[in-house]
């Protein structure tokens, strides 16, 4: 081989080696781009980023944000009642009258519809639940009764039910047996032409099953409602019991009502009524 040829080959070989070195460096540079050093533990041990766990956490968040009740099951705060809105009085509207006509407001009712008022109230049960109640009363006592039931509610006084007696087809026995508190139900006093105080909307029966009507009869005792017999013994302690230490007794008597539990012969422990002298002033009878 002549020296010139040998010299040319040597130059090409060096160029080839230089090219290879350049390509290797370029490769290393390209493959290292975007890499981040893995985080190290406190001991210096390198650990891999938990890609799967992050993904699972993201999926879990996505499920919660989607509103799946299984993921977001929580106790909702109990709704608050606005007593100022829930305690109110209205006249007997056509809608209300349709509910009582032919029942508590019977065909022979001599009390004008205009003499009645509808009350909407709240009350607490023995378990402390708040319930809505409704009652029809005489116009002369509407404001007073609303005030009394507002104070009973705010004092957590237990009343099981306050429904219109019309829900029981104006059957007093059924209403009492269901421990329903009520007022107006037109009727005459038996064997007279005198309207009863319930017939005028001037008497209220409160928690009647636990405060029964006890009447001496034929050497024995007649108790109403029938399922209230065990509560005729007032020496016992039991829920809903009305006596002279009871808040309802105090409130009703302070506002001019008389309590049937104080009568001498018969005892009507559920019953609060306006006295006759006041009724005569209102109705001139």
Image (cartoon, rainbow, N blue to C red):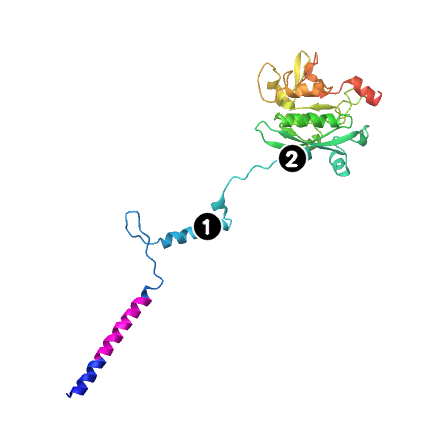
User: Which quarter of the figure has residue 20?
Assistant: bottom left
- Can you say whether 78 is above or below 158 in the image? below
Magenta segment includes 206: no
Residue at screen point 46% across, 50% down:
61
Instruction: Using the image, tell me which numbered label, if any, was put on residue 95.
Output: none
Q: Relative to residue 55, is residue 18 drawn left or right?
A: left
Residue at screen point 22% across, 81% down:
11
Element at label 1: helix
Can residue 105 be seen here? The reply is no
Element at label 2: loop
Whole-percent x, y for residue 72 in the image: 49, 45
* Residue where numbered disc 2 is placed: 82
Whole-percent x, y for residue 264 in the image: 70, 11
Whole-percent x, y for residue 206 in the image: 67, 24
Residue at screen point 37% across, 55% down:
51
Most common SS among magenta residues? helix
Pointers 2 and 1 in contact (C-beta within 8 Å): no
Q: Which of 94 and 88 is in front in this view?
A: 88
Q: Earlier in the sequence, mark 2 or mark 1?
A: 1
- Can you say whether 81 is above or below 245 in the image? below
Q: Nearer the viewer, residue 43 or 241?
A: 43
Q: Distance between the residues labelled 2 and 1?
A: 37 Å
Whole-percent x, y for residue 113 in the image: 80, 32
User: Which quarter of the figure has residue 246?
Assistant: top right
Instruction: Write down the region rendered in magenta.
Output: 13-30
User: Which quarter of the figure has residue 158?
Assistant: top right
Magenta segment includes 28: yes
- Can you say whether 21 is above or below 44 in the image? below
Q: Which of 222 and 26 is in front in this view?
A: 26
* Residue where numbered disc 1 is placed: 61
């Amino acid at each position: 081989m002549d020296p010139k040829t040998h010299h040319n080959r040597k130059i090409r070989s060096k160029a080839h080696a230089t090219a290879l070195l350049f390509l290797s460096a370029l490769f290393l540079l390209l493959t290292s781009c975007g890499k981040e050093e893995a985080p190290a533990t406190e001991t210096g041990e390198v650990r891999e980023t938990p890609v799967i766990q992050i993904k699972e956490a993201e999926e879990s968040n996505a499920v919660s944000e989607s509103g799946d009740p299984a993921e977001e099951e929580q106790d909702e705060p109990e709704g608050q009642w606005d007593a100022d809105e829930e305690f109110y009085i209205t006249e007997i509207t056509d809608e209300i009258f349709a509910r009582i006509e032919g029942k508590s407001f019977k065909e022979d009712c001599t009390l004008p519809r205009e003499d009645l008022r509808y009350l909407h109230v709240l009350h607490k049960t023995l378990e402390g639940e708040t319930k809505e109640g409704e009652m029809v009363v005489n116009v002369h006592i509407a404001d007073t009764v609303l005030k009394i039931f507002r104070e009973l509610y705010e004092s957590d006084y237990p009343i099981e039910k306050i429904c219109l007696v019309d829900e029981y087809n104006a059957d007093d026995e059924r209403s009492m047996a269901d421990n329903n508190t009520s007022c107006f139900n037109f009727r005459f006093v038996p064997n007279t032409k005198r309207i009863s105080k319930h017939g005028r909307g001037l008497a209220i029966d409160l928690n009647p099953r636990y405060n029964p009507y006890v009447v001496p009869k034929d050497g024995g005792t007649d108790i109403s409602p029938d399922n209230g017999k065990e509560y005729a013994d007032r020496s016992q302690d039991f829920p809903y019991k009305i006596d002279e230490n009871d808040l309802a007794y105090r409130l009703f008597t302070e506002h001019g009502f008389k309590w049937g539990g104080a009568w001498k012969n018969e005892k009507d422990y559920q019953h609060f009524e306006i006295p006759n002298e006041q009724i005569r002033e209102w109705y001139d009878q």
